[in-house]
Amino acid sequence: MSNVLSLDDRGCETLVAPHVSSGRRAEIETELGAIGDEFRREQEAGLSELEANLRAWTTLHARDELRTRCLEVADKVRRAFSTYVHVGIGGSDLGPRVAHEVLDSTVHNELPDDRRGAPRVYFTGDTFDPRPLGELLSLLEARGDLGRTAFNIVSKSGKTPETLCTLLAIKDKLGADWMRQVVLTTGERPGASILFDLAADRREDFLGILPVPEGVGGRFSQPSPVGLLPLAVAVNGAAKSPAERLDEALAGHGKGHEMMLSGPDNPGNLAFRLGRWLQYAEEALGIGTLVLYDYSGCRMLGDWLVQLYTESIQERGGGMNVLAARGPTSNHSLLNGVIGGPRDKMVLFLRWDDLGPDLHVPADESIKGGLEIFMQKSMQTLQDASCRGTMADFGRNGIPTLALNVPMRDAYHLFLVMRVLMDMVAVKGRLQGLHVDAKSQVNYPKELTYQQDGVEGYKQAMRDFLG
């Protein structure tokens, strides 16, 4: 089995390519060549330039010191605590949720000692709704686990109000000795983070302090301690060690890095191929919505892409919306709108070759009506047939499709998929000219792909109401 992703873009070759003029194709190829050259030049310039351009996320796989620090804190959590609670919102929350949903057991918290060192895992801090946090704290108290729970507070600036208010509620519940149960994952520079400044004189009292590295924005932070600590904490020790899991994940991110630098005309450079098709579809067909159809049955990867793409690419009145779908569940909800609704959508499938341990549908002679065809088939076979059938049906109905074929559901391929999608966003942002400022000057440190100025309005309006 190959350890590399492949892209099936026949649906776009058929339905998008004929609408793109040869002249425009040539222009985009020239632009892609320049983007590839700049990415390589930036890498050669080194970490300081990557940090200035908010693109230090591209080399996180090579930051051994971050891996080591995450493993040290993970070991403390796994040895001394029965429960791990991840507190964050946006990029500080979605990436870790993706990894837990895709890689860990769907009944992880219900497993007995079979978790082999992995504590129970919960997520909170992404809302002011009091119910989730209140019920979680009540559960921990009732179970006698409150004092054996590690809380990881994740915010680069420490100013995220949802996260900070959750921390204050937890701090109040834990009492004077609260720091021994708290990990801070935050900006590690004086003055850059309220949380870092809070810990300045009492670093040794905390369970751990981990950095959100310079030049790494929230929605690109999964390969940093933001995603690596929970990845190491939650791994079932019967399957592999925390170090083995991190090495697997970072190798996937590193493979994506290699692919991204391989040149825009390399067929194996999937990020450039995807960015090219998105630009074609938007320009030539007026496509306004990208639907991510994850055929693993998981929810969170789609939610992660919604944030990654829309916060990065929807700028200056342009950029596609993203809808999150999962097959075949969404075939009974969203599919009818894709086929019968406005022709403003294209679909990106994630098709998984191996979803893990399989089940078979037994034969049953009492079931008729054409359903016999499903019997004595594996669930993996049925899932794949559903994926292929959905792609074929979209094609027949004139919906452009792309499919990322993923060999296996494991940490290597998950981090490789996420890296390719992050690079796809980086390429698309450059094709949209988001690195060019209002004065038509190239300004990489202020590239809109890595900003999120739009969120400041709601924060100020909320303060106005509170004031």
Image (cartoon, helix red, strand yellow):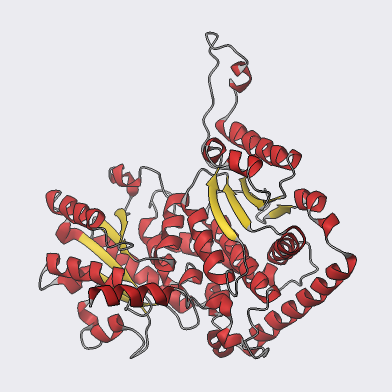
Q: How many marks?
A: 0
> In the displayed structure, would residue 157 be above or below residue 364?
below
Work out whether residue 265 or residue 370 is closer to the camera in this orientation and state it. 370
Q: Quadrant of residue 189?
A: bottom left
Q: Quadrant of residue 78?
A: bottom left
Work out whether residue 149 or residue 302 is closer to the camera in this orientation and state it. 302
Q: Residue at x 44, y 54 (%)?
A: 240
* Percent coordinates x, y for residue 11 in the rendering: 76, 48
> In the displayed structure, would residue 149 be above or below residue 381?
below
* Percent coordinates x, y for residue 326 in the rendering: 53, 44
Work out whether residue 445 or residue 363 is closer to the camera in this orientation and state it. 445
Q: Residue furthest right?
A: 22
> In the displayed structure, would residue 252 be above or below residue 329?
below
* Percent coordinates x, y for residue 70 in the rendering: 39, 71
Work out whether residue 177 or residue 433 is closer to the camera in this orientation and state it. 433
Q: Residue furthest left?
A: 176
Q: Residue furthest top?
A: 366
Q: Residue at x 64, y 89 (%)?
A: 45
Please state if 3 lies on the left or on the right of 247 as rendered. Answer: right
Can residue 208 be seen here?
no
Q: Residue at x 42, y 71 (%)?
A: 225
Q: Residue at x 21, y 68 (%)?
A: 181
Please state if 418 lies on the left or on the right of 3 as rendered. Answer: left
> In the displayed structure, would residue 167 be above or below residue 328?
below
Q: Quadrant of residue 385?
A: top right
Assign the C terminus to one quadrant of the image. Answer: bottom left
Can residue 190 be seen here?
yes
